[in-house]
Image (cartoon, grey):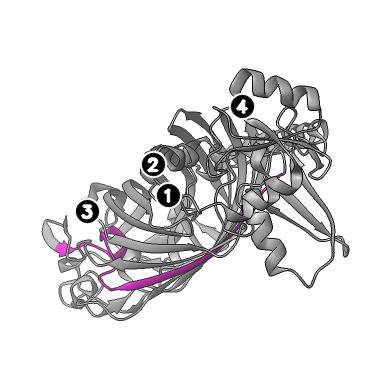
Amino acid sequence: MKPARIVHVALFIIGLLIGTLAASAADSGATQTVGPMFCSYCGRVVTPARSRVRITYTNETSVDVCSLRCANKTLARDKDKTVQSLTVADYTTGELIDGSAATWVVGGSIDGGRNQPPKWAFASPEEAQRFVRDNGGQVTPYAEVMKAADEDADPPAAGAHGRAACHNAPGTELVLNPAFGDDIYHTHAAGCAMVSYKFMHTALDELRSGTSDVGLDQVGFMRDRRYNYMMIPTDMTMDMHMLMLMYGITDRFTVMGMTSYQDNKMDMLMDMGSMMPASHASPMRTDGFGDTELRGLFKIDGRFTGSLGVSLPTGDIDKSVKLMGADFRAPYDMQLGSGSYDLKPALTYSELSADALWNWGAQAAYTWHTAENDNDYRLGDSFKANAWLQRALGPMATWLRAAYSHTESIHGQDSEIQKLLSADPMMPMMTAPTPDADPANYGGQRVDGAIGLSCKIGPGSIGVEGGIPLYQDLNGLQLKTDWFLTAGAQVMF
């Protein structure tokens, strides 16, 4: 299928999905059956959803918290504000009702999660009595319930309650997504861990300079053409296997470690000059472990997460390839790491709808290559912005994602890679000039569009995402990205 046809089909699918999602949103209405993902006071996962509390002030602002205990803490903190209403989730329907008018049951056999001892609100006194008959507990006046909530100890997240909160909370199939092509950073409750595996495939095809495609008739060696190269890239594949481990130190602070294994392959034409036609050369190929990343993530509040990663230079930057029957150091894009210690700050915004059926958000991330590596060059710093919209469909979720990236050219040069370009005028065939050996032919700007689907299975989930570039403005002459695919699986424990 031609690239233009792929774009048309992808845009049609994206448009169809947007229409489906919009219709679903209209059908779902403005229900208040499930609380937000995180408590605005303690930052914890709101689980179970029936413990949710909303405080509304006279200035029409409101906050959602995970329990009566956090509601009391919030009221004490905001004592200068006038409260208009305090509503709680009805145990039977999940809808928000007036807390002071509800019939309350304290205790019983139903697990209250962090809402300990369990405190449930009922709009119907009859439903409260039925609950007591079936599950135990005691009907308790509202004032005593609020007093007891203020005296509750802060329960730990670890143990059975905390582990259940890791993967059973509303919206986890959206927030803990296994298949985003870019890492969207999130935290986990204390004592909760996640292991994630991703396979990422990127296909590059055809040359481009700036926003214009460059045909093979414009590239050649010792010919009267615009670009003078002997080894001409025609297409490339980059496969990456990523393994990531996350662990919640506290309910607001999570640590992450990630490593990868890469396999890069580039097909080329070899042009020996005007005396003979260009022919296919043996492909360049490199593989091995990439850089290792360590990251700390802190939940600022229920919507924002800040994170800082440090990339350790464990990937090889001395990989070699055979060209023209001789060994050369592989070009920059065939190496496996940056060779430098890199800092990677990011800020993530994520919002969950009140019914936990929709998730939307954005993330800004930066990669700073702090110094030249041992081979006297530094990869270009990069900025990336992501935005997404997700819709839960039972245990499944589907999403649209757009990403913008800007990457600088490489600074400095590797003297060994430079030998690919440095020809002896008397013996021009003793080199193998290729655009990938020029540091100026790296970086640029790109806008991607992606669509994905995932499925939650107990404490685990699987998913896949595919996408294409919608816009590419590349520095110098380089292969353009054609399409990309990510498949992932993860498990919580």
User: Residue 306: image x %, image y %?
Assistant: 51, 66
Q: Nearer the viewer, residue 14 or 167?
A: 167
Q: Which residue is mark 4?
A: 394
> Relative to residue 126, is residue 402 depicted above or below?
below
Asked whether 333 falls inside the magenta stretch, the response is yes
Snapshot quadrant of residue 201:
top left
Question: Mark 2, residues whose alpha carbon is within 10 Å: few (<14), some, or many (≥20)?
Answer: few
Marks 1 and 4, how far apart at CA: 36 Å
> Relative to residue 393, is residue 326 depicted above or below?
below
Quadrant that contains the C terminus: top left
Looking at the image, residue 125 sits to the left or right of residue 232; the answer is right
Q: Which residue is mark 3?
A: 289
Of mark 4 and mark 3, the one earlier in the sequence is: 3
Asked whether 352 falls inside the magenta stretch, the response is yes
Q: Nearer the viewer, residue 40 or 197?
A: 40
Residue drawn at (65%, 19%), measured in percent from left and top?
Answer: 133
Q: Which residue is mark 1?
A: 204
Residue drawn at (21%, 66%), measured in percent from left and top?
Answer: 317
SS class, disc 2: helix
Does the residue at mark 2 contact the one at mark 3 (Cβ under 8 Å)?
no
SS class, disc 4: loop
Please identify, in this view, whether the residue under mark 1 or under mark 4 is nearer the observer: 4
Q: Which residue is mark 2?
A: 159
Of mark 1 and mark 4, the one earlier in the sequence is: 1
SS class, disc 3: strand
Boundaries of the magenta span: 328-353
Looking at the image, residue 232 sits to the left or right of residue 385; the answer is left
Of mark 2 and mark 3, the one earlier in the sequence is: 2
Please identify, in this view, whether the residue under mark 4 or under mark 2 is nearer the observer: 2
Marks 2 and 3, how far apart at CA: 35 Å
